[in-house]
Image (cartoon, grey):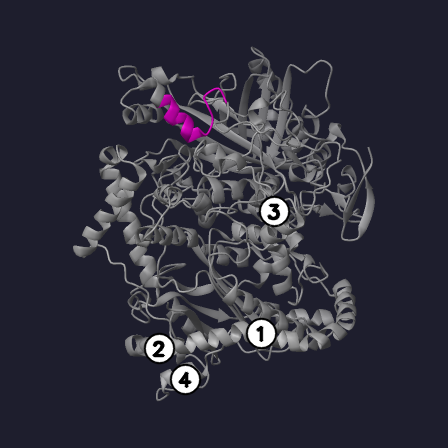
Amino acid sequence: MAATAVDSGIQRTASAVDYSDVQGLVRFGYGKLTESCFLLLNIRDAAAARSWLATAPVTNAVQLDQASPTALQIAFTHEGLQSLQVPDEVLAGFSAEFLTGMAGEESRSRRLGDVGANAPEYWQWGGSGRVPHIVLMLYAQPGKLEGWTLAIQEANWNAAFEVVTCLLTSNLDGIEPFGFADGISQPALDWERQRKPAKNELAYGNLAALGEFLMGYPNEYSKYTDRPLLAPDAPGSTALPPAEDVANQRDLGRNGTYVVFRQLQQDVRGFWRFLDAQTNSDPQARQSMGEDMVGRKMDGEPLVELSDDPIAGIDPGTTPHNQFTYNSDADGLSCPFGAHVRRANPRNADLPPGSSGLLSKALHTFGFGNKQYRDDIIASTRFHRVLRRGREYGPGLSPEQAIQTNVSDPGEHGIYFICLNANISRQFEFVQNAWIMSTKFDAMTEESDPLLGNRQPVAGCPFTDTFSVPQVEGLRTRITGLPQFVTVKGGAYFFLPSLSALRYLAAVR
Amino acid sequence: MTPQSQFMVLASIAAGRMDDLRHLLASMNREVGVVDPQNRLVPFGQFERLHFARFVIIDDKTSVDVAAYGLPIVQYPVYLAFLGDLDGSPDALLAELVQKAGDGLRRIFAHCDGFSSDTDILGWMKSHNVAAAAFYANWLGRTVRQVREEDTLRQALESFVEQHRDSLAGMQAREKHAALKKFVAAEQRAGRITLTPPEPTPLGWKIRNFLHLVGVPLVLLVLSPLLLLYLPVFIYQLRSREKTDPVIAPRIEPSHAHELAELEDHETTNQFSAFGSLKPELFRRELLTFLLWIIDYAARHVFNRGRLTRVTTIHFARWVFVDNKRRMLFASNYDGSLESYMDDFINKVGFGLNIAFSNGLGYPQTNWLFMDGAKDEQKFKYMLRRHQLPTQVWYHATPGLTAMNMQRNALIRQGLENMYMTDGEVREWLQLL
């Protein structure tokens, strides 16, 4: 399984991934462990916390014949690593976004759309001064979560941690609270380290270089994303694997990644009632409008036709709903340009479609050969993928229940949006900023994501609450006055360490 | 057609006046990063031909990088630069500036060397105006007035379609087109929509542009035997340097990052000012001069219709040599956030970035001038951020409109003014609305 990595002239043999060093969440979604909760913790006492961490039963990514009935994952914020007294010079090796934090700068909040009702000052957790130190992610088979939660709170637990909040999830069987099948589009990871990204990928592919999701490996640029490297004589560094790209350095990041965690409250009633009012209570038209906004049928079927060409990293046998690109829908007639899933992953290659021959490649490289003014605006989605591991919360509510006016709301609905990526700014933040939250995505003028948009005016652009559906006969259907359906209630950036990095953190000082 | 142009008044800041100047410039802003278009010093909003303007203090902390070549560190002056991107001739705009904002400009430039209370400010600004080595405008001939008028048109059409959704739904495409045309004509008569026809293209500009169009290839043709002879030497000179030139791209200080971030993403367009030294060699200076000459040619005659190669997000950009080509300023106005701007560039036109910037000191290693370089994504981004200067004052005449939005609006107008359209063209036009 030896592949070769080339960087800065250093050539060494790439070793196989040691699954026992990787937290399982990178490889598995723990779909069978349908019960889960996320414990947000603050460290009370660093020494006690370290000794708890030293024996924490953290689940690795080794595939077992008999899946474990429970799993535990652990990730740290910058504040958490500081509380563990990780030296500043080590911390300085983490990415700027992680160090600043999701809510640490107004400009970041502007870019992420965390303004208006989404502003961190209204968050239940994660806002200024309220960033938790640790998230413990607990997963269990039905009926086993409570026991598992108690089981891990042993030894030094009470001395070590203060539980900020316990975020309980619910199992809606792969359906997100608005009622749509979720989690269909996921990048496939190149665990075998076989992928050699070309300088220009001429077709959209779904197989991602490992370094996009795991630090310490080459990414889609065939480079190693920056992460903390330690000198071999740094205290505790012997617990860490050597860096693959830099001689004589220990790699704190290898086999670890970043977790983006956002609590997104969904106004399920507001969503379906708005659609109901727009469609004169015609159930079919209501559903169809919702599907236009999402960009998929409720059962997950894409709105555009499936592609006949194979897509690397997609097995049409197991994930038929993922076998498509938007190349066949340049006018947005099948799937509106602004539909949520089209924004979240526009499925573009590095050059626009039709760049096959030498001449057309050359023409497209210089920006010629476009048919319409909006061609080739978005490209190279392979650098902007995230691996989603979210879970729902709150009770399920069908569209029919949601539009009933005489029923009291059974509580809050939403999703704990969780995604993994090795480069937060190029992956999650880019997708969130340039695609999801942009009022100008794909040459549009004053729209926002039909689901996630905050509808806040931007300077010179007072309306961002429209959604348009292109029509074959010409004038598009334009829905105006979209209310905000999703509100951010909390969030933070975490570092998900490898098992060896966890040992380092447990022994640091 | 009114061609676009630019000015850049550059003057060194007098000793001890820096803090005062910063304070004064800050007073032009409503909040950090957001100018007051009617500020009392230079009320930019009153200038109908001005697309963008900025004041930026050029205090280059990276000039120490020449030490990597074993050269002594030069103490360069700290400059104040005043930049504008505009319609028509820069001299006319400078005169208008002096006329409407002479006092404010005097107060600002009084902080610069060689400026006193009896200085003729117009003459002084003209004599301190530094020409760009290369200049890019998104769309040749698109004026501020046109952008504003066409956006009013778009909004009016959108609300008309909204209000008459049902009656329009029953019509054929051509009937819809006719109905919308009729509506716009009535609005024009009522004075609610104005679509000013383009002004005649200045004859002098036409001649100069034509001479430039044919002159540059002619010069290249004449020089081509020499260039061809020189090519092997050039390749040797280039390759030997590319392999050894130091790369200086450390992560930037959090405080610098914060200072820059505070100024960004207040609307859908952003400013970018970057400054640095060229690699300290005659070879690099001459090479960059040549490359920018070509880039300027391409921007003027080839990429003047909405796309700089594949990039659709740049409104204006320029490269300006400073200090006898020892240093350079790059300034641009672009849509989106800096991260997406950088990614767009790296992924779409990495080769172009390498050609335009790899003669800058510390640039990530290139091969054959256009390969690799920017594809070292993180190093490239660190380097760019490290050379980026906080822009103290930045004005944008039409905030909230991206270059693509402007293009869409122009196409909407075109579809009204076109005499003959095929059925397909009518449908495509309707899809724009």
Badge 1 amino acid: Val
Any mark on residue B216, and which? Answer: 1
Q: Nearer the viewer, mark 1 or mark 2?
A: 1
- Is residue A296 shown in magenta? yes
Query: Do marks 3 and 1 share a subunit?
Result: no
**Residue A135 found in image quarter:** top right
Query: Do marks 2 and 3 share a subunit?
Result: no
Query: Do marks 1 and 2 share a subunit?
Result: yes
Number of other residues with Cα within 10 Å of mark 1, as a class: few under 14, some 14 to 19, many 20 or more: some
Name the side, left or right, on which A81 lies relative to A126: right
Mark sitting earlier along the chain (1/4): 4
Report if residue B173 is visible in the image: yes
Badge 3 amino acid: Ser
State which chain disc 2 sits on: B
Mark sitting earlier along the chain (1/2): 2
Question: Which residue matches tag 3?
Answer: A95
Q: Nearer the viewer, mark 4 or mark 3?
A: 4
**Residue B368 found in image quarter:** bottom right
For the residues labelled 2 and 3, the Cα–Cα distance comes to 48 Å
State which chain disc 3 sits on: A
Q: Position of residue B206 (x, y in %)?
A: 43, 74
The residue sitting at the left extreme is B190
